[in-house]
Every structure is written in structure tokens, then in C-alpha cells.
Image: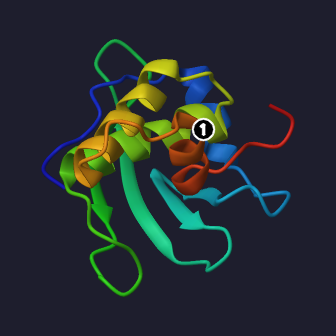
Amino acid sequence: MSRLPDRVWTDGDWDRIRHGYAARDMDEKWNVFTEGDVVLMHRSWTGHCVYEVTFVPAAGGGRRIASAVAEADGERRRNMGDEYDCLMMELIISAIVLGEPAAELRAGLVELAARASGRSDLPSGLVEHSVLGSRSGS
């Protein structure tokens, strides 16, 4: 991917990210796990890997994303472009794995969906749930 999130995650965040996240019910759409410095984001129902994200230490501490690959098979998922994938990677980590509110990222998702559909009246909750799902206990 040519576009990556600029965020630097703290060492504490990285500890939590490394432990991943397993979907606990049908409303959750993501399973996240790590292998070394690589974070893999799979759709919970299909098991398909959508994102493979490599983290490296950041100058001054914490971790940042150095590279990422997104599933390109059109039969497995619709390609929405690097801007969408960049936002989704950060949103999955922030909202699903870390349990953060991620309001700005969520608003960006709704904006991108509206732009892609040509509709300005998309219900934000529907957009978020359709691609992000929910996180149990949040």
C-alpha cells in the first residue's frame, strides 16, 4: 500500500496490539493477531486475511506502521482504494483492538462511504456496522 497511517502507537498500545483481538459474537467482524512484528487482520466470518501490517520501532519510542498489504482479490472484497484501506487499518486497531472511541476515524469512514456511493444521507451507524462491526463490551 502506498498510503499508511501516520500514528505512532505507544509501547503500551503495542503490547495490547500484540495480544490481538478475537471476535466474540456474530456482530464482530474482525479477528486480529500478530506474528512477530506483523499484524494480521482477518474477517471473522470468512477467515480471509484483509490486511497484513508490519510495525517497526519509531524514533523516540513506540511503534509505527512501516508497510502494509491489502487483499486485492475482487471476489473476496471490493477495492475501495488506499485512502479507505489506510483509514480501515487504523480504525480496526484503534476501535476494535484498543477499544478507543476513534470518533474522527469513524467520521472519516462515513465520509468515504458517502463519497463512494454518491449519497450524502448514509446513516453513520449502518456504515460503521457494515464494515467495522461492533466490539463486545463497548
User: Going by the picture, which residue comes out furthest to the left?
Assistant: 2
Q: Nearer the viewer, residue 8 or 108?
A: 108
Asked whether, in this view, residue 1 is left or right of residue 58, the answer is left
Asked whether, in this view, residue 44 is left or right of residue 8, the answer is right
Colour basis: rainbow
- The location of residue 134, given as percent across then percent down, is 71, 45
Q: Nearer the viewer, residue 53 or 95?
A: 95
Question: At x 64% / y 40%, what residue is drawn?
Answer: 97
Quadrant position of the N terminus in the picture: bottom left
- The location of residue 7, given as percent across then percent down, is 35, 24
Does the rendering let one see residue 66?
A: no
Name the residue carrying label 1: 125
Does the rendering let one see residue 81?
A: yes
Label 1 crowd bin: few (<14), some (14–19), many (20+), radius 10 Å: few
Question: At x 85% / y 59%, what residue is drawn?
Answer: 25
Asked whether, in this view, residue 110 is left or right of residue 40, the answer is left
Question: At x 71% / y 50%, what residue is drawn?
Answer: 21
Tell me: residue 83, above or below residue 64. below
Tell me: residue 11, above or below residue 45. above
Name the amino acid, label 1: Gly
User: Going by the picture, which residue comes out furthest to the top?
Assistant: 60
Q: Quadrant of residue 87?
A: top left
